[in-house]
Amino acid sequence: MFDRRILLASVAGLFGLAAFRWLRTTPAQAAEKFEVEKTDAEWRAQLTPQQYEILRKHGTERPGSSPLLKEKRKGIFACAGCDLPLFSSDTKYDSGTGWPSFWQPLDNALGKTEDRTFGMLRTEVHCRRCGGHLGHVFDDGPKPTGLRYCIDGFGLVFHPAGPSAS
């Protein structure tokens, strides 16, 4: 009886380790080379603590905490890490999630990786130039794409359009 319990506990432990390995995420930076690459110290010096946590450590902000959630002006949302234009204000909409949402990125702006954190499979989006984590894309968005790019606002900077673009 004692030996069977040890065997069952060992098997359960192995399954637990396998599940943990499957659930963890692999940062995009480990798999790809990017045009903009900096040391950890350089990123920390350039970014605010919130930006660093999101862009470099795959963190997320509290829902409703980003000032860009309520940004309604015409303009471009760019990467806070390298200033690559990512989204047009024309594709921004209120998804009700608490994070800035867009139904389409600009051409050649994003990269995608598989994210298995929290026991689910999601598609992470990152800046294609610096690899900064931005958020995730889901297939429950509005027409015409049906996609919802759920983006951490602190990973973005906003550049308003000129006065003639209103």
Image: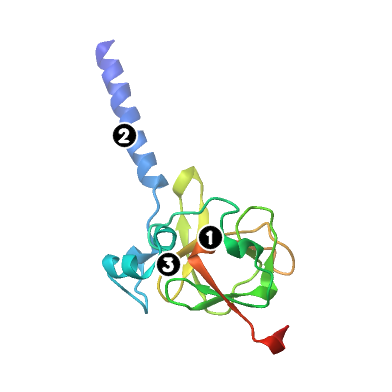
Q: Amino acid at mark 1?
A: Asp
Give the mark toward the camera: 2 or 1.
1
Give the Cα distance between marks 1 and 3.
11 Å
Q: How many marks?
A: 3
Mark 2 lies on residue: 14
Check the image and name the residue furthest to the top. Answer: 1
- Residue 45 place in picture, x, y as percent: 32, 68
Mark 3 lies on residue: 132
- Residue 5 place in picture, x, y as percent: 30, 17
Mark 1 lies on residue: 152
Q: Secondary structure at mark 2?
A: helix
Q: Quadrant of the N terminus?
A: top left
Seen at 59% across and 62% down, the residue is 67
Give the Cα distance between marks 3 and 2.
33 Å
Residue 73 or residue 110, whichever sits in front = 73
Contact between marks 3 and 2 (CB within 8 A): the answer is no
Residue 35 visible in the displayed image: yes
- Residue 129 place in picture, x, y as percent: 43, 76
